[in-house]
Amino acid sequence: MLYAGLLTAVFCLTFDSSRGDEINQLNDTITSKVSSDTRIFSNYSLSNRASNENLFWYKQTPGSSPRYLLHRMKASTDELRSDETEARFSSQLDTSQKMTSLKIVNTQLCDSAVYLCALSTTVLSLHYCLLQ
């Protein structure tokens, strides 16, 4: 049976860097309907204050490499993004709560993908967004 909506299942793989930084998912499963907004959350921890709080989001579709979407840095309120990233995608970074989120406005079926969140360039969290 085909569903008109998008079922988003979120799974996490955490890779620890040698510094001991970590990033983890906050939700096991997220369900979103087409044309609604979808938000994916991750929290992170840093082993020391010298670590960078730069959070990157990537999108990986089946059979392709991860594609950089956007990122936020602690030192800036600006969101930096790829020229190819649609305006429907945005992120938040809350350094006091050690949390980041990716928001997809007007979710479409083509948004089914694996979403990766990376802390600096060493720690990744994988979010599988599956269509069913």
Image (cartoon, rainbow, N blue to C red):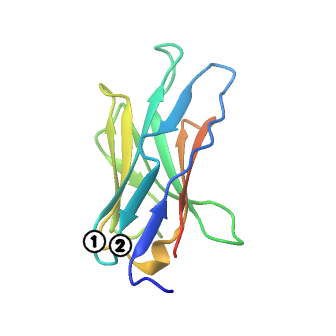
Amino acid type of the residue tagged 2 in the rendering = Thr
Image quarter of residue 12: top right
Q: Tell me which residue sits at (51%, 13%) in the image.
A: 48
Q: Secondary structure at mark 2?
A: loop
25 over 52 or under it: above or below: below
Q: CA distance from mark 1 to mark 2?
A: 6 Å
Q: Which mark is residue 78?
A: none
Q: Is residue 53 visible?
A: no
Q: Are there few (<14), some (14-19), or many (20+) residues within 10 Å of tag 1?
A: few
Q: Mark 2 = which residue?
A: 107
Q: Which residue is nearer to you in this view: 75 or 119?
A: 119
Q: Which residue is nearer to you in this view: 122 or 106?
A: 106
Q: Is residue 73 visible?
A: yes
Place of residue 104 in the rendered image (x, y in percent of width and height, measured from the top left): 35, 64
Is 64 left or right of 23, judged from the image as shown? right
The tag earlier along the polypeptide, 1 or 2, is 1
82 over 100 or under it: above or below: below
Are circles 1 and 2 on residues that touch, CB within 8 Å?
yes
Q: Mark 1 = which residue?
A: 36
Q: Tell me which residue sits at (35%, 67%) in the image.
A: 32
Amino acid type of the residue tagged 1 in the rendering = Ser
108 over 25 or under it: above or below: below
58 over 125 or under it: above or below: below
Image quarter of residue 31: bottom left
Q: Tell me which residue sits at (33%, 29%) in the image.
A: 95
